[in-house]
Image (cartoon, rainbow, N blue to C red):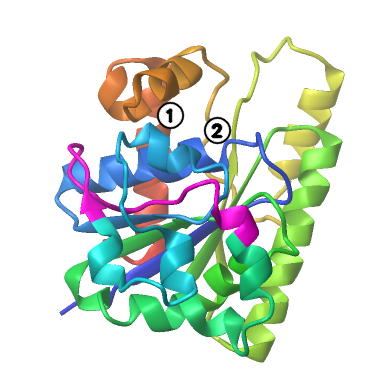
Amino acid sequence: MMSTRVVTIGSKSGGSGKTSTAVSVAAIWAATGYKVLLVDGDGQANATTWCGVTPEHTTGDVLLRQAMIRDAIVPCKFGFDVLGASQDLTAQTVMLAAVTGSEQRFQMALAAVRDDYDAVIIDCPGALESRVTVAAIVAASAAVSVFVPTSKEVNGVTSFADLVTDVAEAYKPDLRMVGVVPCRVPAANAGGEYKDVMAKAVDPAGPWSGLLTPPVRASVVVPASFGAGVPVPVWRPRSAVAKDYEQVAAVLAVSVGLHD
């Protein structure tokens, strides 16, 4: 049996397309036939809302061992399962900081359900110093970052990649970055900064060589699908941005080893 791929998606700040990528890839992989668990590790609980689920027990409850993970996972109508979050997670993260071995809590919790899924996708909070982010990376077999093509966001990818390297050295020598997703990419005539940043990002001699996925364009479809509580590829499957995410999901499936 193929071992479960645990993919952590993170960035240094919110608003970079992290959650839309996590939810869209989960929906696409599930539609392809994979058994997928989406874990919402962000106190904003946007992934949970996007999937239209209202969990009785949450990610924070599981990390603090106030609930068993099997009791917290709920199916959503889009073909995959969700371990949802609530806004309590922000306060629960403070409590988690006082727990011995907190960085291992995701890994230990997921051990109970790993055999149930082909892939687990963890949507991290937009804070690298969060214990939840570190725990999510420790649990991962692969890491993905996202960025809006601005100089500030590019630096955020570097910071996330450095954290992945630190975790790999301390816990998992085989852990690696497998993808960097350009999100909310404007039209080519949007301005010089976008062109300059994307030119550096695609440089084969640059630090992301081989990691950059196809871009995801800026689109009003994304916030509209969030408002509807339906993932982009389900809400508007024929839209250009849904096609973008299909390409991203296909590349990441190969990168994490779901299929060749």
Q: Which residue is mark 2?
A: 215
**Magenta-drawn segment:** 74-91
Q: Is residue 80 magenta?
A: yes
Label 2 to label 1, Cα distance in Å?
A: 7 Å
Tell me the crowding category of disc 2: few under 14, some 14 to 19, or many 20 or more residues within 10 angstroms, Cα based. Answer: many
| Amino acid type, callout 2 | Pro
Q: Quadrant of residue 232?
A: top left
Q: Nearer the viewer, residue 130 or 222?
A: 130
Q: Residue at x 48, y 72 (%)?
A: 63
**Percent x, y of residue 27:** 28, 40
Tell me the crowding category of disc 1: few under 14, some 14 to 19, or many 20 or more residues within 10 angstroms, Cα based. Answer: some
| Camera sees residue 206 | no
Secondary structure of the residue carrying tag 1 is: helix
Q: Is residue 257 left or right of residue 124?
A: left
Q: Residue at x 31, y 28 (%)?
A: 233
| Amino acid type, callout 1 | Asp
Q: Is residue 102 left or right of residue 256?
A: right
Q: Is residue 198 magenta?
A: no
Q: Nearer the viewer, residue 142 or 113?
A: 113
User: Which numbered disc covers residue 32?
Assistant: none
Q: Earlier in the sequence, mark 2 or mark 1?
A: 2
Q: Which residue is mark 1?
A: 244
**Percent x, y of residue 229:** 35, 26
Classify 89 as above or below 51: below
Q: Nearer the viewer, residue 238 or 207?
A: 238
Quadrant location, the N terminus: bottom left
Q: Are marks 2 and 1 in contact (CB under 8 Å)?
A: yes
Quadrant location, the C terminus: bottom left
